[in-house]
Amino acid sequence: MSIDSTTTIYLIIGIIIGISIGYLFAKMAFLIKVKKHRKHAVKQSSSVILGQVNEKIAPLLPNFPYHYKDLTFVGKGIDYIVFDGLAEKSIKQVVFLEIKSGKSQLNANERMIRDAINAWRIKYEIIRIK
């Protein structure tokens, strides 16, 4: 059984076409996947930015439960420490406040902080620098 030159040429052309079509399908699938990931990243980034804006604006809203002068912005792990009543010179309580928007959840660090506070693992400390 021998293969003539025409069959060999057709076989080579077929392989080249097959590889080209496979490459194009793979490239299209890759580009679709990249587009999907980019869209998700932009959506996630928008949510983070909106959350940060909400953290800053929330104290200015009319139904916010604390006086804005009682707030100290922390921003990492906890958004605010509230010295409730400080503006009136009579602190009723200290509140560790986290502001969330939409369906956002506490991250692992925020949960650990919440758990430490709820377990009363809190102290007041002074460090003097000489």
Image: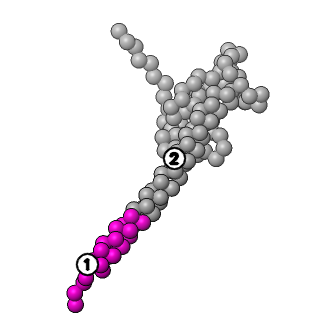
Q: Quadrant of the C terminus?
A: top left
Q: Can residue 118 be seen here?
A: no
Give the residue type that dot 1 points to: Ser
Inspect the magenta stretch and tell me whether residue 9 lies in it. yes
Residue 81 shown left or right of residue 112 in the figure: right
Residue at coordinates 44% horizontally, 18% vertically from top-left?
A: 126
Q: Sequence-wise, which precedes: disc 1 or disc 2?
A: 1
50 up-or-down from 94: above or below: below
Say which element carries label 1: helix
Q: Nearer the viewer, mark 1 or mark 2?
A: 1
Residue named by callout 2 = 38
35 up-or-down from 45: above or below: below
Inspect the magenta stretch and tell me whether residue 16 lies in it. yes
Residue named by callout 1 = 5
Say which element carries label 2: helix
Q: Determine the residue located farthest toward the left in the rendered image.
A: 2
Q: Determine the residue located farthest toward the bottom in the rendered image.
A: 1
Judge by depth and name the residue closer to the eye, 122 or 20.
20
Residue at coordinates 68% horizontally, 22% vertically from top-left?
A: 68
Residue 70 image position (x, y, % from top left): 65, 21
Residue at coordinates 55% horizontally, 42% vertically from top-left?
A: 42
Task: Write the start and end of the magenta stretch as one range.
Answer: 1-21
